Image: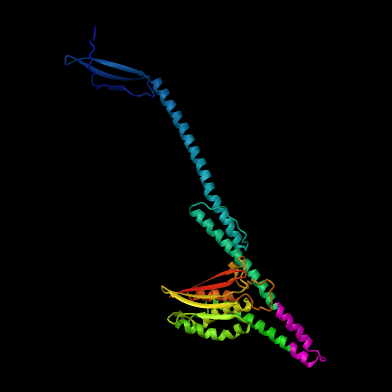
């Protein structure tokens, strides 16, 4: 019997009669078809399950291999990621251990641009600061030792000489004068150290009051003018009468006296030192400028350091302990101001104090 074939696709409404592809040899479906609107017969379709099982088996193998590769890749990624994350942390941990033991020679690798990098940079900065403070402390103690040793040697030596019974009275008086001078030198050093310690511990007080800057300058000018005239140095004062500033007169007088004393020591005859005050937009600027020997560029960054002196020979003729400018700097900062310095060797030095009102 021939079956006519329709060119119009029929809807698939087959029914699965065997779907157990795991246990059975075939999977089967049945689909009814009609002829002239009446059910004419059924089509049965069979598919060998071997092909399905092979396909499923291959898919399982592929999935297993893919899963293994993914898992292996994840483990490798986690391993290297943990190394990348923990290595800088371990390095920073070792660095902090060194710091806690007093070893400040810590060098951390170049930080990355993230939170770990910021932490590494902070630890490196702390190590550098602590190392600098350690060196500064050692230099400070060595300098103090040196400053005390010299006058004490003079005092001890001349005291032994002055005790000799056969010593001429005039010579005895001369030696006693030297002993007194060196004693005063030790006393001055201890006084400056005491003032510096009070500044560090914030145990000193700043009692501000409104001061006419011109009158304040005038009182200091008249006090130091004889010393400048005696050395043949002109002292020029330039400050308007209408400038008022909130300062502690006693503390700020110490600042200006220190700066003028430096100008006096390191300026030659026939030179000029200027004291100038000005105000602009609520900012008061005070300038002490001399025409002295100047400060070498290598020394400029350190002149406010304690016991730092440009004169490495520690000449007793110029005096000073290298504490004056350190005290000046801290007193200016205590007033909420800022002090800067510009200098050229052979042309002079200019200190500028800026205080906002």
Q: Is 195 a magenta residue?
A: no
Up-down relation of residue 151 to residue 24 (above or below): below
Which range of residues does the magenta coloring cover? 149-175
Magenta stretch, main secondary structure, is: helix
Q: Is residue 194 left or right of residue 3?
A: right
Q: Nearer the viewer, residue 321 or 317?
A: 317
Q: Quadrant of residue 263?
A: bottom right
Please indicate, yes or no, whether residue 193 appears anywhere in the rendered image. no
Quadrant location, the C terminus: bottom left
x and y, in percent, of residue 112 in the image: 51, 51
Q: Residue 247: tell me if it is visible.
A: yes
- Where residue 98 appears, as percent x and y from the top left, is 61, 60
Quadrant showing the N terminus: top left
Give the residue at the far top of this rendering.
Answer: 1
Q: Residue furthest right?
A: 166
The residue drawn where x is 50% and y is 56% is 118
Relative to 240, say whether 45 is above or below.
above
Report whether 242 appears left or right of 108.
Answer: left
Image position, residue 141 (x, y; %): 66, 72
Quarter of the image holding residue 46? top left
Name the spot of residue 198 as percent of width and height, x first: 56, 78
Q: Residue at x 60, y 84 (%)?
A: 229
Above or below, 50 against 63 in this view is above
């Amino acid at each position: 019997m021939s079956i006519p074939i329709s060119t119009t696709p029929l809807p698939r409404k087959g029914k699965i009669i065997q779907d157990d592809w795991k246990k059975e040899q075939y999977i089967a479906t049945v689909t009814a078809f009609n002829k002239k609107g009446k059910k004419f017969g059924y089509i049965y379709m069979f598919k060998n399950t071997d092909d399905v099982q092979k396909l499923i088996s291959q898919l399982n193998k592929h999935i297993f291999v893919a899963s293994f590769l993914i898992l292996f890749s994840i483990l490798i990624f986690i391993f290297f990621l943990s190394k990348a994350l923990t290595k800088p942390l371990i390095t920073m941990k070792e660095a902090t251990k060194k710091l806690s033991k007093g070893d400040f020679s810590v060098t951390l690798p170049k930080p990355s641009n993230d939170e770990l990098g910021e932490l590494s940079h902070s630890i490196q900065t702390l190590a550098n600061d602590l190392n600098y403070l350690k060196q500064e402390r050692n230099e400070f103690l060595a300098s103090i030792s040196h400053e005390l040793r010299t006058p004490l040697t003079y005092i001890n030596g001349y005291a032994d000489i002055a005790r000799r019974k056969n010593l001429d009275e005039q010579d005895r008086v001369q030696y006693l004068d030297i002993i007194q001078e060196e004693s005063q030198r030790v006393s001055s050093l201890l006084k400056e150290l005491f003032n510096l310690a009070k500044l560090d511990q914030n145990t000193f007080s700043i009692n501000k009051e409104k001061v006419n800057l011109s009158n304040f300058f005038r009182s200091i000018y008249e006090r130091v003018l004889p010393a400048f005239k005696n050395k043949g140095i002109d002292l020029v004062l330039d400050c308007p009468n209408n400038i008022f500033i909130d300062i502690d007169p006693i503390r700020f007088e110490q600042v200006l006296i220190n700066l003028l004393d430096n100008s006096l020591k390191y300026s030659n005859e026939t030179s000029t030192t200027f004291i100038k005050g000005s105000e602009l937009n609520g900012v008061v600027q005070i300038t002490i400028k001399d025409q002295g020997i100047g400060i070498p560029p290598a020394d400029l960054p350190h002149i406010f350091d304690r016991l730092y002196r440009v004169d490495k020979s520690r000449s007793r003729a110029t005096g000073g302990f290298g504490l004056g400018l350190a005290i000046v700097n801290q007193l200016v900062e205590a007033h909420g101001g800022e002090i800067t310095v510009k200098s050229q060797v052979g042309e002079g030095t200019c200190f500028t104090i800026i205080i906002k009102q």
